Image: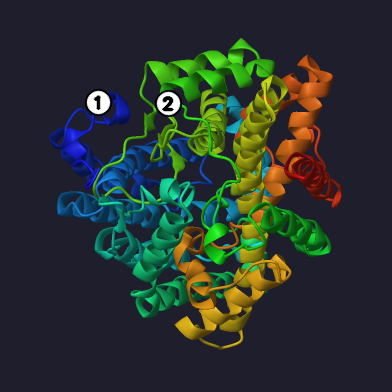
Amino acid sequence: MSTLPKRSELPKEQTWNLEALFPSEAEWQKALEEAARSVEEVKPFAGRLVESAQVLLEALQTYETRMLQAMKVFQYASLQLSTEGTNPTFTRMVGEARAVVAQLAAAGAYLEPEILRIPPETLERFLQAEPALAAYRHYFEALQSRQPHVRSGEVEAVLAAASDPLGAHTATAYAATNADMQFRPVERQGQTLPVSHSTIGELLVHPSPEVRKAAWESYADGHLAFKNTLSHTLQGSIKSFAFQARTRGYSSSLEMALKGGGRTCGDNIPRAVYDNLLATFQANLPTWHRFWRIRKKALGGQLHTYDVPIYDAPAPLVPSPKITFWEAAETICRGMEPLGREYVEPMRRGLFEERWVDWGQNQGKRAGAFSSGLKGTFPYIFMSWSDDLFSMSTLAHELGHSMHSYFTRKTQPIVYARYSLFIAEVASNFNQALVRARLLREAQTPEYKLAVLEEAFANFHRYLFVMPTLARFEQELYSRIEKGGALTAPYLMERLAELFAEGYGGEVELDKERLGAGWMHFSHLYSPFYVYQYATGIAAANALAQDVLEQGEPAARRYLDFLKAGDSVYPLEALRIAGIDMHSPEPVERGFGVLKSMVDELEKLVG
């Protein structure tokens, strides 16, 4: 194929069912206008929350329902833009929806400062008097714990209104990366292979080293053309978060991120969890050095940077078996059977009937994969499909997110119908671990077993090697900004290349400039201190998968209860429901134990 199809040319079954959100853009426009008018519905409660339990309840419910409606308007526009990044209509729609959400947030900014001014004995009386308000008890307790960082109603209104312009750095980076960035195609044997965000994953595991190298260089060079623009947008994003942390009185951006200062119910993650992860990762780098050494030998004594791209899977030692989307969907459903019908049946409906997944490749489709949705919507999945185990792994991963969302939103009221990023990556990696375990049990040949292990290594490479390395990188960036320093493209590239070189242990021949450009591939860095949670997530996920496979129904029931908890408890408490204690390094060590066992198996298979 020399060119990708236009969005309008994709078969319907390869696209998600956004008609379930809004049947048409005209209906969306009507909802946008309604959301804008709803801003006035939130304001009349200001200054009145102490009057009665009924007034407090009505204020909270009005704000929640109106914000949920506005977020659905934003979601529809955002999902459309993700599939057609060059479409100016969708760009306009996202901007209009974002502005309304910011206006609504500003209008309701008085809520938390006023709640904190309600005398504790009065608030307790309200909770006793109004059963519907009692559901907010955890929210009120979490809010109380954040009291030192909640500002006056006026300041909160300014911070809420500023969320739109402060988010411009992310929007600019998105536009530069997904709309303006161009990549030269790969020419091979008279065939032109297009390089794009949606095709790069498939090209990087191509059987031909020449194709992999050319695709990797094209993709890196496309980003390098924007290195100065993107260094400024990343710096602006970090400065924005650091500004908010200072304004709220946190000692650092990291403290605000760990406490979950920007979330309704907070996170309350101890600093030790973050430090344990980075320390355990560095202590286990010799395992990664051994892994690279084995791969280097298996590939004939040479391992290049393009063989281990930090944003995708390492070059495969064996080709992946071909598997269609529908075959993969069926395989995943079988792999998740240990969780029972309660889990598998809604997932099967989403895959085969309700069109949760947008998986076709088309012009203008952005990079990556994600799960997105709100209470009352489908838990949509975005990805670009290639007929291989790596795509199946991605689908299983995103289905983990979507099923987590499905159970949380089905079980919890609006106030608790979200969950922390800290536990999000547990559910996604859990699915991969459970499906992988079944594939390994059913493997009929060494070649197939090696192919499954290759998928596993791709997963561990991303989440237990790349993400902790990015976490070390990110921590240094925030520290540099908070000390008054600046971020330049040369500094970013040099420092990232140094950190990855340490992880490679001298086993990989480096193209330092293109390797150093890797920070531009990760939109995750625009979500402060997100990346470390991938590593804690994969560690906890593999521990939980082992428990379910060994203990059966009791462990499965605990896991489903974890999925249903949402924000009704803090994330570490949710993990305790499932049977994992992240206060100690033990779960991360268990994760590296799984990696070590797979490296042992790899060495046996390749000799």
Q: Residues within 10 Å of mark 1 (few under 14, many from 20)?
A: few
Mark number, residue 167 = none
- For the residue marked with disc 2, what is the amino acid? Thr
Percent coordinates x, y for residue 532 in the rendering: 65, 57
Up-down relation of residue 324 to residue 274 (above or below): above
Pick the front one: 140 or 380: 380
**Most extreme residue toward the left, as rendered?**
26
Pick the front one: 516 or 343: 516
Q: Residues within 10 Å of mark 2 (few under 14, many from 20)?
A: some
CA gap, disc 2 and disc 1:
16 Å
Quarter of the view holding residue 275 = bottom right
Q: Quadrant of the N terminus?
A: top left
Q: Residue at x 68, y 54 (%)?
A: 295
- For the residue marked with disc 1, what is the amino acid? Lys
Percent coordinates x, y for residue 569 in the rendering: 69, 38
Q: Which residue is mark 2?
A: 324
Would residue 113 appear left or right of 215 to someone viewing this image? right
Up-down relation of residue 199 to residue 509 (above or below): above
Pick the front one: 58 or 11: 11
Q: Quadrant of the C terminus?
A: top right
Residue 97 in view? yes
Element type where label 1 sits in the image: helix
Q: Residue at x 34, y 63 (%)?
A: 177
Quarter of the view holding residue 285 = bottom right
Element type where label 2 sits in the image: loop
Pick the front one: 82 or 128: 82
Q: Residue at x 50, y 68 (%)?
A: 519
Q: Which residue is mark 1?
A: 12
**Most extreme residue toward the top, as rendered?**
341
Residue 59 in view? no
Would residue 326 appear left or right of 421 to someone viewing this image? left
